Image (cartoon, rainbow, N blue to C red):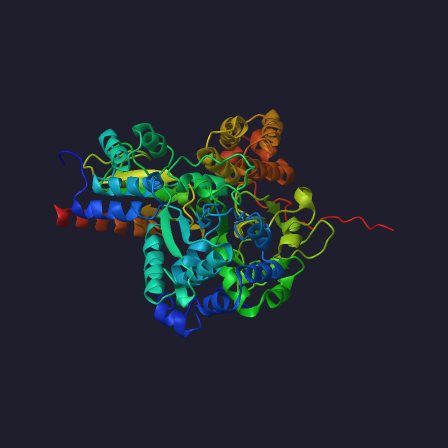
Amino acid sequence: MAVKLLLEKAHIEGIRSYEVYRREGGYRSVEKALKTMSPENIVDEVKKSGLRGRGGAGFPAGMKWSFIAKPEGVPRHLVCNADESEPGTFKDRYLMENIPHLLIEGLIVSSFALGSNDTYIYIRGEYAWIVDILETAINEAKANGFVGNNILGTGFNCNIHVQRGAGAYICGEETALIESLEGKRGNPRLKPPFPAVKGLWERPTVVNNVETLSAIVPIINMGGEEYAKIGVGRSTGTKLISACGNINQPGVYEIDMTISVEEFIYSDEYCGGIANGKRLKACIPGGSSVPILPANLLLKTAKGETRYMNYESLSDGGFATGSMMGSGGFIVLDEDQCIVKNTLTLARFYRHESCGQCSPCREGTGWMEKILHNIEYGKGKISDIDLLWDIQSKIEGNTICPLGDAAAWPVAAAIRHFRDEFAWHVNHPDESQKRNFGLAHYADPIYVPVTA
Amino acid sequence: MGFMKFNEQQLAEFNRLVARYPEGKQKSALLPVLHLAQESFGGWLSEEALNYVAELLQIKPIEVYEVATFYSMYHLKPVGKYVFEVCQTGPCMLRGSDNIIQYIENTLGIKPGETTTDGLFTLKTVECLGACGYAPMMQLGKHYKEHLTKEKVDAIIEECRKNAAVNN
């Protein structure tokens, strides 16, 4: 069994309650941090841990914390990003539903490190029942002296508030989230200024993902150096992977980033193999915005080496032959799935979620959806494939926020690796309405030239 | 429902929401307050409701309109008593959400965006709700209905009809 730091106790009966959570050793990190460490010590431990942001970007969390400005007399805020909306991702929900006190514990320690006396959890509006779970947990923690004024008699005050969003993927982007928290449309802000300098109500703000903030608990308990020993290279600690699509055991798994992609898909401890005895065709390993890979490039890198479930290995080969760890939303497609159809649903998603501020994204996402719709329904032209490529390349890098890139990458990767499937749709408009392209050659071993 | 106003209990909730933010930053409560208004005023937000929220928060009506039209969870037209919001994004599609949507259309005799003539059901297709591992799925009120099959859909419709009959 692999090391588990976040979900180790998630299955204990009653762990949602303060009583059981505390009995199982919960809130020890608050006692340790508030009574024996300074805020600077905590930031140092997080830096040593090598923890990278678990929301998708993978930015070192300790470094992000160290950027927070500390102007005299201006309050600072920690905001927890629980707007989990990247298709394929449902790990934060799992954590909040099953072991909510772990997040609350992480929030108190992190708030102390950053000097936040009012901390906000911004949760996607659809997770309505989880708001109740979190508020119950906060109230229990408050009744036991871990939230509120003068926590554990240390003089540190911290209140935690839960704010519901109302249905907008873009609010997962940190500046859009801040706008939304201020009661506005979720339009991302121009950076700089970064939130660490001017964030919520123009005050210094740090926005971190649910899983990132939960990981602060084991980091404080075991120390940053010990945490960094788990995993490999710059992929330290454990990562939650939410696995879905055509697999036998969809669900949320905690991995220590040393296992191979093949083991993750086929082992009974994780996905349990492809459903209905089918063969693996493709996979989007890190949430819908990261590049889709055909089976052959998913299991092995272009150099023919085993691919592992960590930041470096998943991105080995760059976008030409690799993908990304992203948010850990692992979407598996079996041999019966149509890449064009899958890409169409994702293009529709991004068109729907574009905030409309930047024209390349606002217009481009709609154009891509229309063209993909035509190809999928037998009305495409061969030139449409190059047109799609052209549009996505003009969205990428030309928008205020990363939603443009997120919309462009899935289309680019689908064409890069599955161009012949797109061409088959165009050339066989009738047949493509009756059957799918199938597995074709997408699982065949890739020829690796032997160099002298 | 007469002139639109929160009752005492709803006003208490309104005050609880506003109290989370610093003095003068009450606009931050707009999203939660719109949720409260939608729940309180029949499941959708009329212009009257939006204006009332603006008045309560002491902001301009346009500040409320621009938010209400941006977020997908606010209904700006009347909806049925039960709104089936079925996810159709990639991961759900891979697990057969198209068939579920088709089945609901056939069973209720409505297309996405429409409401049954008895005012009981509205069907909406929505984008990813974060339940990809439990697909296909839909949101019904505050909760998710997951691992949907035709049989499960039948049972949900049946349950809604029963609840509606009891409440009438």
Q: Position of residue B79 (x, y in %)?
A: 25, 36
Question: Looking at the image, which residue sits at the far right?
Answer: A452
Q: A271 or A167, which is in the foreground?
A: A167
Q: A397 or B91, which is in the foreground?
A: A397
Q: B93 or A145, which is in the foreground?
A: A145
| Viewer can see residue B29 | yes
Q: Position of residue B99 (x, y in %)?
A: 39, 43
| Viewer can see residue A173 | no
In this rendering, position of residue A291 left or right of residue B143: right
Question: Looking at the image, which residue sits at the far front?
Answer: A72
Residue at the (40%, 67%) spot, across then down:
A153
Q: Quadrant of the N terminus of chain A?
A: bottom right
Question: Looking at the image, which residue sits at the far bottom?
Answer: A23
In this rendering, position of residue A416 left or right of residue B114: right
In this rendering, position of residue A62 left or right of residue B76: right
In this rendering, position of residue B77 left or right of residue A223: left
Q: Position of residue A191 (x, y in %)?
A: 55, 37
Q: Position of residue A174 (x, y in %)?
A: 49, 43
Residue at the (60%, 61%) spot, across then down:
A49
When the figure is inspected, residue A363 is found, relative to residue B29, above or below; the finding is: above
